[in-house]
Each structure stands twice: as structure tokens, then as C-alpha cells.
Image (spheres, helix red, strand yellow):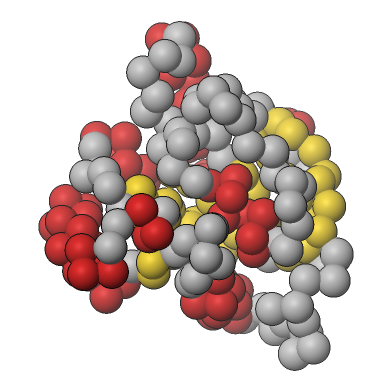
Amino acid sequence: MHVKSAEFIKSATASAHYPEAIMPEIAFAGRSNVGKSSLLNVLLQRKSLVRTSSTPGRTQLINFFCVNNSISMVDLPGYGFAKVPLEVKKQWGPMIRTYLQNRPALCAVVVLFDIRRIPRDEDLQLLDWLEEYGIMTIPVITKADKLKRSQHQKAVAEIAKATGLPADAFTLFSALKRSGEKDVWELIQTAIEDKGIALDPQE
């Protein structure tokens, strides 16, 4: 995918404030500090379009971006960070469920997992919701550079076992080395095309 333009559209917490769903949409979800903003910036070929925070769990908004005037990308709030106030934690579930239920143009959700961490309850809950709503899941394992290549297979197998997903469904990604970028884009394009939406071949 050749990214010719990428811009922030708006932030929202409730469906009444979402932008109109007029483009195929891809959402990104994962635990706080899993590297979601870094992945998005690499995919969008921008250094800091999606802001990263030194305090995991700080961003509790749904952020919408427009790519090439043809694709909507959505940065969903991170979850699972211990220092987030309890009331904020309680808001995450209803906020995400409302989003998943109210975006008819949603083609897939890219779910991120840290290669060094075993998925926990919130990760599994998210996967359950995606299955419940029949939304395609694109599982990506981030921070691949944090482990030696010889350790990758074991780490992927452990994450696959915890999630119940096949090991070959996961894509390894490193923002530092920009590895996996092409693979993630290909999966995104496939998800959009599976919805019967044709993308410009020049993009």
C-alpha cells in the first residue's frame, strides 16, 4: 500500500460523535503499551501522526484517521494497565462493544499482542466480542525485536495456545526494524476486499 495521505479526523467516546461511516474501516486494539501507536505510525509512514504516550493507559478515546481518502483507520483505547483508575477501566468494555456494534463499514480489527507477554482476560474478552459480532480478526505480535529469532517460534506458540488461534494466523511485527509492515498491509487489503470493496490498484 502506497500511503499518499494520512490525517487525523477526530476523537470520540460515544457513537453520536463518530464520523460518518462512508469508507471501509480497520480498527486497531490491544493492551496498553503493546506498541499500537508505533504500528500505526509505521503503516501510515508517518513519524508521529498517532501520538505515543510515556504513560500507558493514558489514551481513553477512540481516534479516527483517514488514509488516502479511501480508508478509515481507528485507534481504539488500550486496556489492562494497572494504574488506570477503576472507573476508566469500567468504561473500556462498553465503549469498545458500542463501537463494534455501530460501525457497519468495519472490515476487520487488528489485535496486537506483545511477543513477551501471555494474553490475559481482556485480550480473550476482545477476541470473544469479535467472534460474537462476526468481525474479522487480524492478530499481530509486536516487538519481535525484543526476542532473538530463535525464540520467536516458542513465543508465538504460547500466544496461540492462550488465544485458541492457529499459530500461522499471527504476523510478527517490529516497529524498530519495520519488519512485518508489508504483511500487515496485505491482510488489511484482503479484509477490505473480502467485504466486496475494491481498492485503487495504484494505492
Within the image, what quadrant is residue 124 found in?
top left
Looking at the image, how many numbered discs can be counted on the residues? 0
- Nearest the viewer among 90 and 4 is 4
- Eyeballing the image, is 192 above or below 77? below
Residue 3: image location, x then y, percent: 78, 71
Which image quadrant is residue 186 in?
Answer: bottom right
> Which quadrant, please, contains the C terminus?
bottom right
Quadrant showing the N terminus: bottom right
Image: 40 above or below 69: above
Task: Provide residue 109's location: percent of width, then percent of height.
Answer: 49, 56
Q: In this view, does 116 lie above or below 54?
A: below
Nearer to us in this view, 67 or 13: 67
Q: Which of 141 and 101 is in front in this view?
A: 141
Q: As displayed, is residue 11 above or below residue 189?
A: above
In the orientation shown, which residue stands out farthest toward the front? 148
Residue at left offset 21%, top offset 45%: 118
- Compare residues 39 and 104 and report the one nearer the observer: 39
Q: In which quarter of the image is residue 58?
A: top right
Residue 200 is left or right of residue 94, and the answer is right
Q: Is residue 166 something that shows in the picture? A: no
Q: Which residue is depicted at the point 44% across and 43% down?
A: 34
Name the residue: 27% across, 47% down: 116
On the image, the x and y values in percent for residue 81 come to: 40, 24
Please tell me which residue is depicted at 26% across the width and 44% down the height of the picture: 117
| In the image: residue 89, left or right of residue 1 | left
Q: Is residue 148 something that shows in the picture?
A: yes
Q: Residue furthest bottom?
A: 201
Task: Give coordinates of residue 99: x percent, y percent.
Answer: 57, 40
